[in-house]
Image (tube, rainbow, N blue to C red):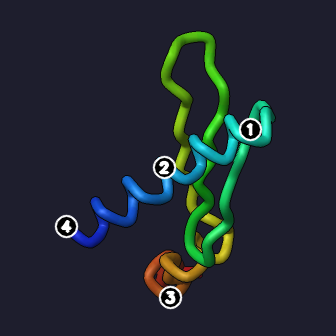
Amino acid sequence: MPIFITFYESIINYLKIRRREEDVFEKFVNFSWFIVYCRESDDVNDTILIRPTIGAKLALKNDANASSENE
């Protein structure tokens, strides 16, 4: 768990700094399993979104268990 927290804090801080330096509305980083977005918001804090990629969703899906035996 501490490794995830350290990684999370590092990537969030990096995106916040880079978004402000480049003066853009949105900055994102695409990892192999998820995408992290940093968007400008009306208040002081930026909005952070973490979204899984399509490849990650497909890797977790098991079609053998999802199908009915009666099909």
Marks 4 and 1, the one that precedes in the sequence: 4
Residue drawn 44% across the image and 82% down it: 65
Depth check, front residue: 71 or 29: 29
The residue labelled by disc 2 is 12
**Residue 71: mark in rendering:** none
Residue 16 at what x, y percent from top left?
A: 57, 41
Residue drawn 64% across the image and 66% down it: 53
Kindly check if marks 4 and 1 are in contact, taking CB atoms under 8 A apart as contact.
no
| Mark 4 vs mark 1, CA separation in Å | 27 Å
Left or right of residue 6: residue 44:
right
Residue drawn 49% across the image and 23% down it: 45
Depth check, front residue: 45 or 32: 45
- Count of marks overlaid on the render: 4
| Mark 2 vs mark 1, CA separation in Å | 13 Å
| Mark 2 vs mark 3, CA separation in Å | 37 Å
Q: Residues within 10 Å of mark 1 (few under 14, many from 20)?
A: some
The residue labelled by disc 1 is 26
Q: Residues within 10 Å of mark 3 (few under 14, many from 20)?
A: few
Depth check, front residue: 26 or 13: 13
**Regarding mark 3 in the picture, which secondary structure is present there?**
helix
Q: For residue 1, which quarter of the picture? A: bottom left
| Mark 1 vs mark 3, CA separation in Å | 39 Å
Where is 1 relative to 47, above or below?
Answer: below
Marks 3 and 4, the one that precedes in the sequence: 4
